[in-house]
Image (spheres, rainbow, N blue to C red):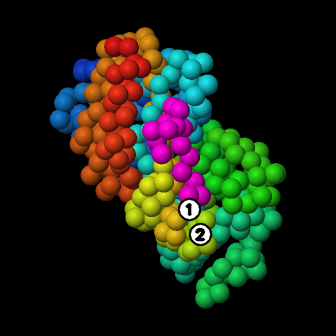
Amino acid sequence: MKFLKAIVAAGLVAASTSAFAADITGAGATFPFPVYSKWADAYKKETGNGLNYQSIGSGAGIKQIQAKTVTFGATDAPLKAEQLEKDGLVQWPMVMGAIVPVVNLEGIASGELVLSGEVLGDIYLGKVTKWDDAAIAKLNPKLKLPSAAITVVRRSDGSGTTFNFTDYLSKASADWKTKVGTGTAVEWPVGVGAKGNEGVAGNVGQTKNAIGYVEYAYAKQNKLTYAGMINKAGKAVQPTVAAFQAAASNADWAKAPGYYVILTDQPGETSWPITAATFILMHKTPTDKAASAEAIKFFKWSFEKGAKMAEELDYIPMPEPVVKLIEKTWSADIKS
């Protein structure tokens, strides 16, 4: 957990200095927290301006921006155009990443275990309860799977990571779609709840025979064992930047009202099936125009100078044409 402590520390440094410079406040998704923290630290060093970002989950972030208690909200579950209009909000994608199943299985290394969306759904439905179940064994004939009960770990808070994970399960499993469906918070049939990507990562890391789902940066930086997946094309794929980019390449941001694009279960033989974007929400007519303008400066800087930092944490930067569209959205829709 050293990585998480480091990025929390970076966030606190940014927060503690914000009172002496421009005060940019944001709250929401835990999915992009590692990259936002890295950007905040570099931005503080370059400009002297701090960022106070609360990693509290997409659901809470949406509530805070609706209540105007922060300059921006962050969510991995994008709001539809009619909701944006109702709340007077502007939305855009900031960066893309991926969600991976993570496990704690003795003697099994990252990428050795392979799961399909249907089997993953059955695990979270409570239909597949042991690691040596025939459905898992069929996908992994060369692995020695333990005859042990699966400890299912899921999010306890309103979560955009959950939104994308359950959206994928709804596409891959008819049973999941019928019984549970998609949402930032759902009625989980089974599982132990944990708060944030941080909580799920910590719980899986400490619990033998556990399975969970987290943003890839949390899996990698905390040295968790991740599983490979069978994608929409029926191919076994590993979570790599190339696989995330393959899935993201299908997105048509220009035609989507409010940039509402869901990247799960994309076609393509090399596509990672649980790829996702994370979004920023701001008011069209901000209460504090100076703070809003400073936040836009931070986001502009992040697009211009933060791509390499994002890639180092295995996120996918937004393509240049999309960034240009977003900058036009800022000019047209946010009153300064």
Q: Quick check: marks 2 and 1 in contact, CB under 8 Å?
A: yes
Identify which residue is drawn at 24% across, 27% down. Answer: 49
Label 2 vs 1, first from the N-terminus: 2
Identify which residue is drawn at 80% across, 65% down. Answer: 127
Seen from this angle, which residue lies furthest top? 287
Q: Does residue 72 sit above or below 314 in this rendering?
A: above
Tell me the number on the disc at residue 314.
Answer: none
Q: Does residue 248 sit above or below 280 in this rendering?
A: below
Tell me the number on the disc at residue 233.
Answer: 2
Q: Main secondary structure of the magenta part?
A: loop
* Three-letter residue code for mark 2: Ala
Secondary structure state at the residue bearing disc 2: loop
Magenta stretch in the rendered image: 252-266
Residue 76, position as x, y percentages in the image: 53, 41
Secondary structure state at the residue bearing disc 1: loop
Q: Does residue 98 sit above or below 301 in this rendering?
A: below
Residue 63 found in image quarter: top right
Closer to us: 142 or 305: 305
Seen from this angle, which residue lies furthest front? 255
Q: Does residue 171 sit above or below 16 in this rendering?
A: below
Would residue 291 appear left or right of 86 to someone viewing this image?
left
* Residue 259 forms part of the magenta stretch: yes
* Three-letter residue code for mark 1: Pro
Q: Is residue 320 visible in the rendered structure shown here?
A: yes
Residue 217, position as x, y percentages in the image: 43, 56
- Distance, label 2 to label 1, CA atoms, is 6 Å
Identify which residue is drawn at 28% across, 27% down. Answer: 297
Residue 144, position as x, y percentages in the image: 63, 86
Give the residue at mark 1: 267
